[in-house]
Image (cartoon, rainbow, N blue to C red):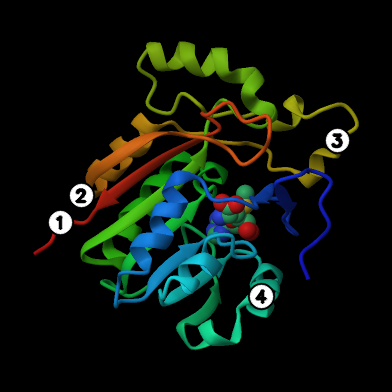
Amino acid sequence: MLPKSSVPGLIPTLNNTGWMTETLDDYSLAFTEYAGTQQAECLDIGCAYGVATLPALAKGARILASDLEPRHLEILAGRVPPADRARFRSQPARLPDIDFPAGSFGALLCARVLHFLLARDIEITVRKMFDWLLPGGRAFLITDSPYAGPWWKSSPEYERRKREGCPWPGFVSNYPSLLPAGTDPSKHSSFIHPLDPDILSRVCREAGFEVLEARFLRGGTKSATGREHAGVIAAKPAL
Ligand SMILES: C[S@@+](CC[C@H](N)C(=O)[O-])C[C@H]1O[C@@H](n2cnc3c(N)ncnc32)[C@H](O)[C@@H]1O
């Protein structure tokens, strides 16, 4: 069963890694549609309780759902309709450590996970993703942007660093200091690393991808302004 939520539009994770959205941003939606057209299996990594996995399965996709937290995967498995179960499997995994065989997937989604990683681990992860895809396969990457979460207060600093050419201008090293009074800092990451569409595009190009689209995306809450998330859709060149 899904955990109870105090915030409309968001479901809390069980491992202090923020929230799963209840609705799909534009690029997660595009993943579900693209995955539904693929014969090859597709990967949803950082899937939580399946906000994207379930609609992708409903569109006919074969999905490997993966997440750091095995309890998320157990809850997700209980939500998969009988008609979709033969096209679903799951595997716990931690980015950037996990290795899948080269050429495993027709497409992959990594929605709102990379901002929990340090710069070097983001680069390692995206290079691995390139390897995991079949030639012609597509990566749909979405992160939280500097304009979301409690770290929006640091967005002027992000903008200043970006103007000055810093390659990772959104990095927040003192995340607990930005949390609302009374929040338990032990329940949050010590840092947070929101990204923007330019950074995502650069990391994808450096890994060998062709960038098809990149932009800010609207979040899933009523108060969304339109730039809560950053996204990129990138293709591994066909042979
Ligand atoms: C903020 S939630 C996003 C869930 C969903 N993809 C969405 O867009 O709403 C982050 C999810 O990524 C998982 N996660 C966090 N760090 C991870 C890592 N290093 N490797 C794999 N999964 C991770 C968490 O367990 C959690 O389910």
Q: Earlier in the sequence, mark 3 or mark 4?
A: 4
Residue farthest to the left, as pictured:
239
Query: Could you tell me residue 180's position as x and y percent?
Result: 82, 27
Q: Which residue is mark 3?
A: 183
Give the label, 3 or 1, closer to the camera: 1
Q: Is residue 93 visible?
A: no
Q: Amino acid at mark 1?
A: Pro
Q: Amino acid at mark 4?
A: Arg
Q: Earlier in the sequence, mark 2 or mark 3?
A: 3
Q: Amino acid at mark 2?
A: Gly
Mark 1 and mark 2 residues within 8 Å of each other at the beta carbon = yes
Give the label, 1 or 2, closer to the camera: 1
Q: Please give the label number shown on residue 79.
A: 4
Q: Secondary structure at mark 1?
A: loop
Determine the residue positioned at 45% across, 15% down.
161
Q: Secondary structure at mark 4?
A: helix
Give the label, 3 or 4, closer to the camera: 4
Q: Which residue is mark 1?
A: 237
Q: Which residue is mark 2?
A: 208
Residue 239 vs 84, above or below: the answer is above
